[in-house]
Image: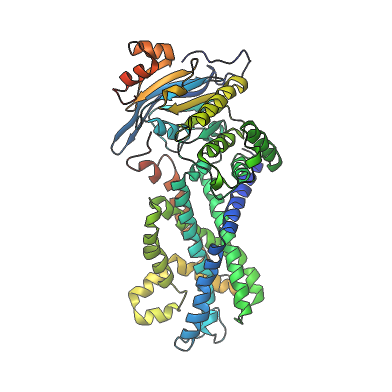
Amino acid sequence: MSPLHYYRCLAGIVAREALRFLHQRERFIAALVRPLVWLLIFGAGFRSVLGVSIIPPYETYIVYEIYIVPGLIGMIQLFNGMQSSLSMVYDREMGSMRTLLISPLPRWYLLVCKLLAGVAVSILQVYAFLMICLLFGVELPLMGLAYILPLLICSGLMLGALGMLLSSWIKQLENFAGIMNFVIFPMFFLSSALYPLWRMEESSELLYWICAVNPFTHAVEMLRFALYQQFNWQMAGLTLLALVVFFGGAVWAYDPTRGMLSRRPGGPAG
Amino acid sequence: MSEPATNGRDFDRGGDDGAVLEVSALSYEYPGGFALKDVSLRVAAGEILVLLGPNGAGKTTLFSLITRLYDTRQGSVAVLGHELRHEPGQALAAMGVVFQQPTLDLDLSVMQNLLYHAALHGMAPSVARQRAGDELARLDMAERSGEKVRRLNGGHRRRVEIARALLHRPRMLLLDEPTVGLDVPTRQAIVAHVHALAREDGIAVLWATHLIDEVAEDDSVVVLHQGTIRAAGSSESVIAAAGGGDLLDAFSRLTNGNGS
């Protein structure tokens, strides 16, 4: 297989995801409405209740809306990762996953392509959200919007890999609601997306530690610093570690010799 | 297996012994028990091997193993001499597959589905578009290329899947009950098209079905039941092995009445 083959495969998978995304306009709107509701409604409501002291990377007092922007960026990517997970389960149920899996390229590479395609879609959503933030007067450093791009790829890959790993466990589309309850909401609320960790520590030591080890917290903090053109090595390293673990698990799960797909009882008909 | 019908044309005969597909002593176990036990078969260029078996015989499991959706350490699969376990890329590149379950993306057009498949096989977009047009034309589907798959009926979707399976010019075509749920004229058209592919292009075909009337006179036959091969060879030899009658009688006897 030549490098050109690898490139064409990636281009084909990204093009397919883009086409599907374009056909699902409501998905794009939903991806934007969710964080905007938090920003414009919850943000306005909580502004007076939740004070944010000066914590890095902020050099002065900030309004609550500015604090939650990185968390809402993470939320977009988290939901997009889970949407990709849902899409993979749907593809498996509808059979189109087989077209991908019987391609001659290595399976890990096919999964990387799927991940990158999902990340490309999530980055479009993130930048659309950031533009709306600017329109509504949320003060964001413009240079930070460019600086954040490579780290958005990293966080998107990590959350997409988590979705991919979960998709290997979900046997039916109907089980997706469980993912919402047991993965998305705990990950989002038990993180630094909506409140700084020191505030959580004041309330509960246990919850603080759960938040501190949550990979979503690491991704959000990495993005928070990146928005202010600061590279947080610790958070980036932990995000990268989570990416390696989740993606390794997904490759294992989709491997025909070892993964869960081959151990399902019953097997195919015929 | 019987000698393949190649219509006098000189095809590349595949691996060292002429086999395009060689399945050797393949077994596969689900948590509930064996789905396949010690299955061996080979298909040469231009040969159509019909895998006859009732529902639950293990045909789809066999296809899943040949296409590496599943894997087993018991036995081996080789395509053009490439062991699937050690050289999966080369083996899979030589295969075109039509699964029992439809695998087209309903929200994409016919052409978009074909181009997606071509990209997975590393084809240049311009070449892919040309070949997609040719394959669709061969199946009288050229005028439907811009339509969403969702709008096509079952027969047309099957034709698109066959066109897609042939897009990258495979040497081996795997068809897992491709005519299930189709009306008689459509079934006959698909059977005729696949026979023409084997005869004219020298493609090796493994065709899984439980429909006896899809077996042509010069096809090779393997009867699979409860995960084991009950008989293999030409139609005549399978009938003889089952004690006479016609192929339907033989199939029914070999599968303990499940194949009728």
Residue drawn 40% across the image and 63% down it: A180
* A182 relative position to B111: left or right: left
Residue drawn 35% across the image and 42% down it: A263
Image quadrant in which you'd find residue B130: top right
Nearer the observer, A233 or A145: A145
> Is B122 drawn above or below residue B37 in the view shown?
below
The quadrant of the picture occupied by the N terminus of chain A is top right
Nearer the observer, A225 or B15: B15
Residue B243 seen anywhere in this rendered image of the structure: yes
The quadrant of the picture occupied by the C terminus of chain A is top left
The picture places residue A171, in percent across and down from the top left corner, at 38, 50
* A143 relative position to B206: left or right: right
Residue A234 seen anywhere in this rendered image of the structure: no
In the rendered image, the residue lying farthest to the right is B126
The picture places residue B244, in percent across and down from the top left corner, at 35, 10
The picture places residue B5, in percent across and down from the top left corner, at 55, 15
Rendering colour mode = rainbow
> Is A214 drawn above or below residue B97 in the view shown?
below
In the rendered image, the residue lying farthest to the bottom is A48
Image quadrant in which you'd find residue B171: top right
Nearer the observer, B198 or A212: B198
